[in-house]
Image: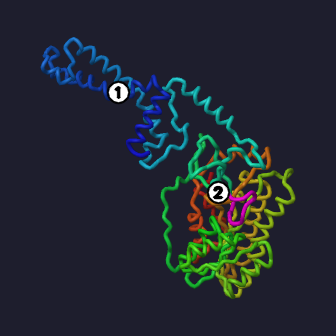
Amino acid sequence: MRGVQKLAWVEVKLFIREPIALVFAFAFPFFMLFVLAGVFGNDVDPTDEENLRVWRGVGPSDYYVSTYVGLVMASAGLVTLPLRLAAYRDAGVLSGPHALFRHDDDLRFGPSSGGAHQRHARRQQRDAAHAPQPGRAGCVAGLRMVVGGVAHHAGIRGGERDPRRPLLPLGVAPGLKGIGGTARVAARQSHPGSITMGENTAWDEVIIPGRFEGQTVIVTGAGSGIGKATALRIAKEGGRVIASDISRPRLEELVAGNQDLDHVPVAGDVSQEPDVAAIVAAAGPTIHALANVAGIMDDFTPIHEVSDAVWERVFRINVEGIMRLTRAVVPRMLDAGYGSIVNITSEAGLRGSAAGVAYTASKHAVIGITKSSAVMYGPLGIRVNAVAPGATITNIEAKFASQLAMQRLGPLMQAVIPKPAQADQLAASITFLLSRDGTNVNGVVLPSDAGWSAI
């Protein structure tokens, strides 16, 4: 809804929720007629029938009574005016014609509305009753989350959002297929009481022609999400992209849909030496840049519950994969005397409240690899940096396998929720560091998270 439609809808909702108070405010424009009659009373003879007909037929016997009634109603309207303004503001009416209702509870009312505090308390109790509960196969029933950039919500249809379900921000680098398969994508919905950071307006990708002209760049996790957006951005700017992903069909789709771009698909697992060798061989003797984007999520288990299988799988992809491919690429960069590497860490690499112990430890390890490599190779012409995505819409999925994790992390994650970015917005951060525009930047961890990490 936009413009007048939105304004009218707010009035309707206010009238339904605040019938006693709003009947006065809603009637305010009508009864201003009688106020005007009183204001112009000095110029109108109340006994002159002809003159009084302009005031909608108000007769002499009704003139003084209607004037007093108008003043009373106008006063009631002025008293309730802050109520309406607050409702307009909270509903987004005052923030622009394109704003949307964020939550049914975003129509908040001030102390002047009777029973507002009691209703707010009841809404809080209701929200607590809708806290995530364990579902089948280790999933959280009704869980909606942002995973390192994934906006995921079981049951979302066509991008529609359910304001009754919470948004849990995480921080996962997508690329390889995560535990449990592919997640559905949905737009972000603010949770009541949350602080919204970085309300992204429409953002158009600006291609810089020739920025990667003549360069060979390896991008892992290139079949989807941030990796795919990065591979496309580099190729559009003149680069030759060695696109690696665990999924051959996704790579084939990437190439088929962008035949005018220079993509060399190499399907494989970056944690396996034969696949790493194939990626490097496809690149050729000179490799100018490497974007380690591929990664998987854990199941949110804390250390006393984590299984060997989850720990080993997460570290094998998220840490060993980066180590093995970087180890194979660096010698060629050393020979060339130039190179740029960007590793994708996560919000979980900056805090302990965004994932389970395996994923959190793996993303902290990625930062360790980044800083160590920056120190070692910086003087030799190789820059190594990391990007920590905040909430980003990708296709990775996560499942809670721990009741303790749901109880502890759920409330923490709902405290501050930035609006999910598009994958190409993350690609803009990555390609900046990969390119020569990132000169003099080495060993940094760049949070691309709409300010989430600043809180």
Point out which mark residue 150 bears: 2
Residue that appears at 70% across and 56% down: 397
Of 160 and 277, the residue lying toward us: 160
Is 174 one of the magenta-colored residues?
A: yes
Q: Is residue 383 visible in this depiction of the protein?
A: no
Residue that appears at 79% across and 44% down: 403
Outermost top residue? 61
Residue that appears at 14% across and 21% down: 51
- Label 2, residues with CA under 10 Å away: few <14, some 14-19, many ≥20: many
Q: CA distance from mark 1 to mark 2?
A: 47 Å
Q: Is residue 428 left or right of residue 285?
A: left
Q: Where residue 323 appears, x then y in whole percent?
A: 77, 73
Q: Where residue 59 appears, x then y in whole percent?
A: 20, 15
**Callout 1 touching callout 2 (CB < 8 Å):** no
Q: Earlier in the sequence, mark 1 or mark 2?
A: 1
Q: Which residue is mark 1?
A: 28
User: Label 2 sits on what residue type?
Assistant: Val
